[in-house]
Image (cartoon, helix red, strand yellow):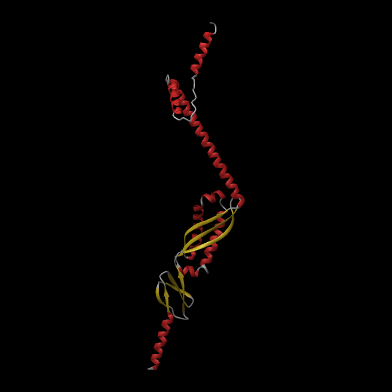
Amino acid sequence: MYGILWLGSFVLFVILISIRQINQYQRGVKFTLGKYSKTMEPGWRLVIPVFQSMRKVDIRVKAVDVPDQEAITLDNISIGINAVIYYKINDSAKAVIEVENFYFAVSQLAQTTMRNIVGTVDMDTLLRNRDEIAAKIQTIVDKASDPWGIEVQAVELKDVRLPQDLKRTMAKEAEAEREKRAVIIKAEGELLAADNMSKAANMLNQAPGALHLRTLQSINDLSSDQSNTTIWMVPVEGMGALQALSQMKGPM
């Protein structure tokens, strides 16, 4: 009787120490006598001690912070660049069997790929098309990590650090560009104003008395304020009439 109880207790103890819990966000890679047997789903699973072993793999999306990298662009400018990579494990067995440390492997692969891609573009292209550069890095890293059962979902370039001398040069260039735009806009405004004034002069010249009425209107506008000084303007025709009168009075 005691032997049966002892045997039952021993079996119960073996079962208890053989139970492994796999959470919903995990998968269990099971090995039997050192050989891969299957991938276990979430829940309580039995792993026979000594003969079997299991390694849990987190299948949630992971963010890898790629540290600052010194890279040289196509136009030989040394810059600093860093990024973040988001990836998840699609095949837990491959992530355990095909690569020793998939987290470290993805980080190193991202660093080398980022430096290589930066070396194929010039600085202006890198600053203008950061999304395209990030997409290229994602494509290359995703393709290289496919044998590891890893899917790269996104790559974001966080910062591009430029040398201080280059920053000052770019600031001067931007300032010169703004001054250029200001001069062009001012010149275009003067040209438009001159064109409108020319059209107005032609219209006043074609209508008899229009210039005289415009003069009287200007005088009326000036006289509405006591602080203004009124200036009487004599048309050229009036000056010609006065000159003609003076010539007529001379012989007399």
x%, y% of residue 103?
Answer: 51, 66
Left or right for 112, reference 56: right
Depth order, front residue of 163/74: 163
The answer to whether residue 122 is seen in the rendering is: no
Depth order, front residue of 179/8: 179
Depth order, front residue of 243/143: 243
Q: Is residue 246 above or below residue 128?
A: above
- Res. 22 image quadrant: bottom left
x%, y% of residue 191?
Answer: 50, 31
- Res. 117 image quadrant: bottom right
Left or right for 22, reference 82: left
Q: Quadrant of the N terminus?
A: bottom left
Residue under the point 54% across and 49% down: 125
x%, y% of residue 89?
Answer: 46, 65
x%, y% of residue 203?
Answer: 44, 23
Left or right for 179, reference 59: right
The answer to whether residue 64 is seen in the rendering is: yes
Residue under the point 57% across and 59% down: 68
